[in-house]
Amino acid sequence: MPIRLNAADASFENAFAALLTGKREASVDVADTVAKIIADVRARGDEALIEYTKRFDRLENLDAGSLAISQADLDAAIDACDAKTLDALKTAAMRIEAYHERQRPEDARFTDTAGVELGHRWTPVSAVGLYVPGGTANYPSSVLMNAIPAKVAGVARVVMVVPTPDGVVNPLVLAAAKISGVDEVYRVGGAQAVAALAYGTATIAPVDKIVGPGNAFVAAAKRQVFGQVGIDMIAGPSEILVLADGDNDPEWIAADLLSQAEHDESSQSILITDDAGFATRVEEAVARQLKALPRETTATKSWADFGAVIVVSKLEDAVPLVDRLAPEHLEIATADPDVLLARVSNAGAIFLGRHTPEAIGDYVAGSNHVLPTARSARFSSGLNVLDFMKRTSIVRCDPEALRAIGPAALALAEAEGLDAHARSVSIRLNM
Amino acid sequence: MPIRLNAADASFENAFAALLTGKREASVDVADTVAKIIADVRARGDEALIEYTKRFDRLENLDAGSLAISQADLDAAIDACDAKTLDALKTAAMRIEAYHERQRPEDARFTDTAGVELGHRWTPVSAVGLYVPGGTANYPSSVLMNAIPAKVAGVARVVMVVPTPDGVVNPLVLAAAKISGVDEVYRVGGAQAVAALAYGTATIAPVDKIVGPGNAFVAAAKRQVFGQVGIDMIAGPSEILVLADGDNDPEWIAADLLSQAEHDESSQSILITDDAGFATRVEEAVARQLKALPRETTATKSWADFGAVIVVSKLEDAVPLVDRLAPEHLEIATADPDVLLARVSNAGAIFLGRHTPEAIGDYVAGSNHVLPTARSARFSSGLNVLDFMKRTSIVRCDPEALRAIGPAALALAEAEGLDAHARSVSIRLNM
């Protein structure tokens, strides 16, 4: 059973604080193993990459010539996909592209009152690596969510790596790569793939940034190559927080809570409501629906270990709780959700009203499903076009502008004891 | 003497590649020491924080009541500052604020052709910690550069920590805090200060993000608390790349190269020019100017160990070299710098023309001087207002909109084997 809290209880603050600080994931320390693999791929390139891939993915005949999955292979994968699913994938891609197109930032260039020309310019990262896991977390939707914003940003070279254990690859994942405009695909995974992307091999040219989810080895490898390349956030287990009044259908809300619980045993689903009777009806509905789920074991464990039902006296009281939890996904299932929307600050994505299940955002809303977890929505954002661009400041003084602002720079450089800084200004002012 | 390369030489590519991959900083492994300090401050709060501060900063009479530097202390610091320097600090603050005001992002909310209401909203991080080093790298300009963008973003609580070894504090640093609108200041530093900001103590409430430069202990502490809080980049030693034709005054360009060399023995100054004679005149001017510098030892070592002079046959040939170096600061000292500006992609900040020494950007241009180092301008940007905000996606379907896009979500959820995801959509469509 999930924990049940009532905000009116004296013990509430302690119990809620425990919910906030509770660790849901066991941390596996694979740093040393990963460091060796990275060093080896960095030193021996393709040779090491192929050795590890042969061993871990059981691909006996792999050689440098067969590392790549060709564009023709991608076309063939598209032909192998079920037409209805392929259509859905294309609908999702179109909507994701349209949503992200609006995120393209604008450059600026202006001259201020001192005569200084200032501005900034956004440019795309040149080459991006996209990690796609094999096995159970091999989701075509994630390919779209990572690759399309990169392409919208103008990244010239998007390189996907995906392990193919025993040669098996999900055609929908390759179809998603094709639909998203991925430029190169390689059948490699794990720390060895991350190392190849970061440092390059004879076959795989290095990239500047690596994104995408992965297991503990991939996460450790991303941490270790950070600096050599950029990385995205290291995503934790999925979370949903549903804020619902008693007028909702308990079956609908139960389904939403389970849509996160089924992801992973470490996922977290929380309901906050102002109606204790409704809370009980949702718990009963969850228990019923769990039995019908193919992923019953996972969802049952997640709901029992990390689920929570919190009753507040009025929904406004939930606002500070939401901001402290800073959930990855927040549903506001009320008749007028904009009232609470205006008061909440920390959440990766917010789903408004009774007809917006979070799963819509996982696939086809258009917004990104790569979102901050583990309370990091307090300080970070979901994946977006800016993650694939960088901003350069631009400054230009003519002699007059330098005369206007130079003396202040000179005074500060002198106060900081940086004489060469001061001299680079004064020498141009004949001072 | 700095290395001298000619792009026409057969050995150039190897020598340039070595320049790219050469490590300039010795990495000091203080992770274990730092982990102990963090665990201790997390467990014992103020008590541990005060113990470490007494020991490391030799502040015998410190207690919880004297951890804070009050707003009255800040006012007194302002009174203690030299009027000319204070004016310069205020000029810088005004210009930095004006530049960063233009970075405030816009929210969006729109309904698309399928009837789905979509959008995003930017909100400020609630509380930000600003680390300010003691000792030689105690720069008031850095306080402005870190605190003002946070305040422009709307951060309600900006908390500065600054160690005061033997009770000594730079009044200009406190004045800069006051001018920037910093809300709280504490006389603590090192890993213990970072731990206090991340986990909170009885005196210092926790923050959501920590920014600002520091020594190896501070950098290691920031890495270790990352996840609990957000952090900014870990800045490396400063860099300048000057792209200059032969029509420049060699003394001016030499002064610019030295303005970075004086920062740190690990700083790097590089000149790329199409005029070999000019290159020699700049090297001679550097040698002359070095002798007159108070920080001669530091600058001499930086220039000898990491300086480089590269001669290309025409300046356009420098463009791919610039993008591979991805310098923190790039000066384009030509008559028509916009030509090269348009072709270069990777640089933290670009200074155009003969009258824009990089030092202008360190203090009073208005643009931020916290910029990506160590080639990270390939994938990251200088500090800006967005670093103190986060973006929340917003999605709203009404029944019609869900009918329009729900079936595609359903198809993808089923293809991914996520039945509870599918169910949360189908249950609302009566399917």
Image (cartoon, coloured by chain):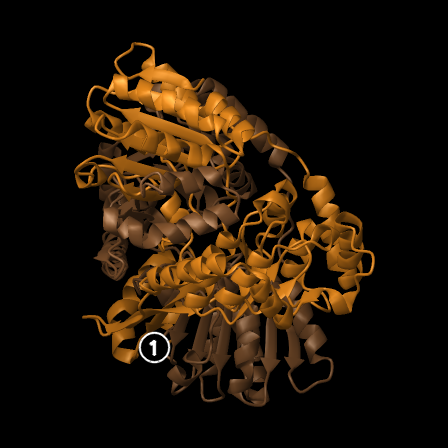
Chain colours: A brown, B orange
**Local crowd size for mark 1, using a 10 Å CA cut-off: few (<14), some (14–19), many (≥20):** few
Q: Residue furthest top?
A: B10
Q: Which residue is mark 1?
A: B430
Q: Secondary structure at mark 1?
A: loop
Give the quarter of the figure containing the N terminus of chain A. Answer: bottom right
Q: Nearer the viewer, residue A42 or B88?
A: B88
Q: Quadrant of residue B71?
A: bottom right
On the image, the x and y values in percent for residue A137 come to: 46, 48
Give the quarter of the figure containing the C terminus of chain A. Answer: top left
Q: Residue at x 36, y 31 (%)?
A: B325
Q: Is residue A243 visible?
A: yes
Q: Nearer the viewer, residue A59 or B217?
A: B217
Q: Amino acid at mark 1?
A: Asn
Q: Is residue B408 left or right of residue A296?
A: left
Q: Is residue A70 left or right of residue A36?
A: left
On the image, the x and y values in percent for residue A128 come to: 34, 40
Q: Quadrant of residue A216?
A: top right
